[in-house]
Image (tube, helix red, strand yellow):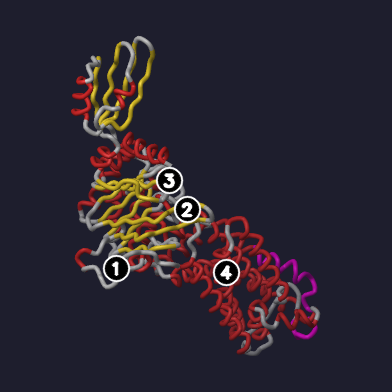
Amino acid sequence: MTTTATTPAGTAPDAAVVPVVSFQGVGKSYGAVRAVADLRLELHPGETVALLGPNGAGKSSTLDLLLGLRTPDTGTVSLFGTAPQRAIAQGRVGAMLQSGGLMEGVKVRELVRLARDLHPRGHSVEQILTAAGITDIADRTVGKLSGGQEQRVRFALATAGANDLIVLDEPTTGMDVASRQTFWGAMRRQAEEGRTVLFATHYLEEADEIADRVIVLHRGRVLADGTAAEIKARAGARRITFDLDGPADRAALEALPHLTALTVAGSGSGHTVRIRSQDADATVHALYGLGLYPRNLEVSGLGLEQAFLALTTAEEAAR
Amino acid sequence: MTTLIKLEILRTLRNKKFMFFSVIYPPALYLIVAGAADRKPIPGTGLSTGLYYMVSMAAFGAMTAVLLGNSERIAKERQAGWVRQLRLTALPGRGYVAAKIAAAATVSLPSILVVLGVAAVVKDVRLEPWQWGAIAAGTWLGSFVFAALGVAIGYLATGDAVRPISMLVYFALAFLGGLWMPMTLLPQWVQNVSEWLPTHAYTALGTAVEGGSAPHAKDMAILLGYGLLFAGAAAWLYRKDTRKA
């Protein structure tokens, strides 16, 4: 293993500011497929971080590397300043994997007790069951659970003891809207107790609602890193739509300030113009300055979902 | 770690189908193999067919349950991702291997006792009480070695490859170790190889006791050596395994 991390020698981090998770120039390939490329990332105590990215962006690989289930080809991964395996053996990390199965042929309560007993600082079984919202299915046999119930059992296993970091890979997959809301409550409580929570998700709403930091991965690299609001701003935060009678001067529209995207639909007598802008006020002001008379003008905010799509498609287009 | 061991034993006992067939198979095989020629002594051993096969079939049956049972179950658990989840706990490798051996031992004990019982009742095998005790204990403890081998194979092979690989290992060990037919009836080169195999050492424990003497130190040392080797390999493979299988 070659270490290409550029941490200056002799600067041992102060114990108070040791990052919970640290990726230093981490690369990982499977054959010809580059899953993670020169990943640099630090998570700090108490953060709730969402890991976003399209399929194949390297989310699962990143989590595998983080948990020591795979070793990086280059760079170093550390948890609490030590090797991932070590941090796990110390019971500092709780994890819920997408690919993590459950032990068959046992009852939910028995499995939770096992996770509790394996943890150096385990909570009481009843406490774990309640926190994960699975008291009602505690006597059911594993293997006869629905997808959403299984997810909650996995969550219980990941939160069976006093961890400092909780890692969740697509935790609400297979849940309906109502149980997803309940689950978010359980996740929030973990964060409120001062734990660092890192979760990968497909649901942007989830990232928007829970995370105080969003990391967008794309092709194994960090594409954006900030609060949900910052990510939205970066992608062009506002959408402006209006109708124009008569011909539309595309070049003039494109020259509008703070514009990040433009589409013009329609022909001849009427056009619908859609603009994405980082400063809607200035763009609209300049629009009137062009001497145009926009009708049905609407300015609306961009959801994280659209922001995310805008970011990743822009990145694809730039390649 | 004790919770995992208890839980593994508990769920093995709950798996009634697996228990039933694992316990029924060895005595059934014993009755077929030992057949009618129960009084005829086997050349070079001084033991009757009924007596000789009692030990080898108890050993064979125990080995079937623990080796095939463990390797397949573990490969399945890896595929399901349970092992990945376990690896994210503070459980040490030896804890996992110990739990799997304990689960296998839960199955092998009744299967051994039933073979001995059938031999006594149906084949009129008569031994001193200490001999019964020593044979049962030796065969049971010896099965741990193959349980560990089962864990190791479950880790080496993935998915569909597990069954053919474990079958190959199982038949080769059973045949070359003299479980199916007395070693004295096999060619000399087989006997030379056999002497160093765990399966031969395994049945030799029982046949020595049947002959009225204590098990040979060499056989015990061979078994112990293989036991440590397999268990060590299994624990190492458990810790090292990062594939999703």
The residue under label 3 is A145
Tag 4 and tag 3 share a subunit: no
| Residue type (three-letter) at the residue carrying disc 4 | Ser
Q: Mark 4: give few (<14), some (14-19) or many (20+) Cα within 10 Å.
A: many
Q: Is residue B44 magenta?
A: yes
User: Sequence-wise, which precedes: disc 3 or disc 1?
Assistant: 1
Label 3's element? loop
Question: Where is A234 relative to B104, above or below?
Answer: above
Question: Which one is nearer the viewer's eye here, B194 or A35?
Answer: A35
Label 2's element? strand
| Residue type (three-letter) at the residue carrying disc 2 | Arg
Q: Which residues are magenta?
A: B25-47
| Front disc: 2 or 1 | 1
Whether pointer 4 and pointer 2 mark residues with C-beta atoms closer than 8 Å, the reply is no
Tag 4 and tag 2 share a subunit: no
Q: Position of residue A290 (x, y in %)?
A: 23, 20
Label 1's element? loop
Q: Position of residue A87 (x, y in %)?
A: 33, 66
| Residue type (three-letter) at the residue carrying disc 3 | Leu
The residue under label 2 is A34
The residue under label 1 is A8
| Residue type (three-letter) at the residue carrying disc 1 | Pro
Q: Is residue B41 visible?
A: no
- Estimate the spatial distance between the alpha carbons at disc 2 and disc 1, rounded to whole Å: 27 Å
- Estimate the spatial distance between the alpha carbons at disc 3 and disc 2, rounded to whole Å: 36 Å
Q: Quadrant of residue A271?
A: top left
Q: Mark 3: give few (<14), some (14-19) or many (20+) Cα within 10 Å.
A: some
Tag 3 and tag 1 share a subunit: yes
The residue under label 4 is B108
User: Sequence-wise, which precedes: disc 2 or disc 1?
Assistant: 1
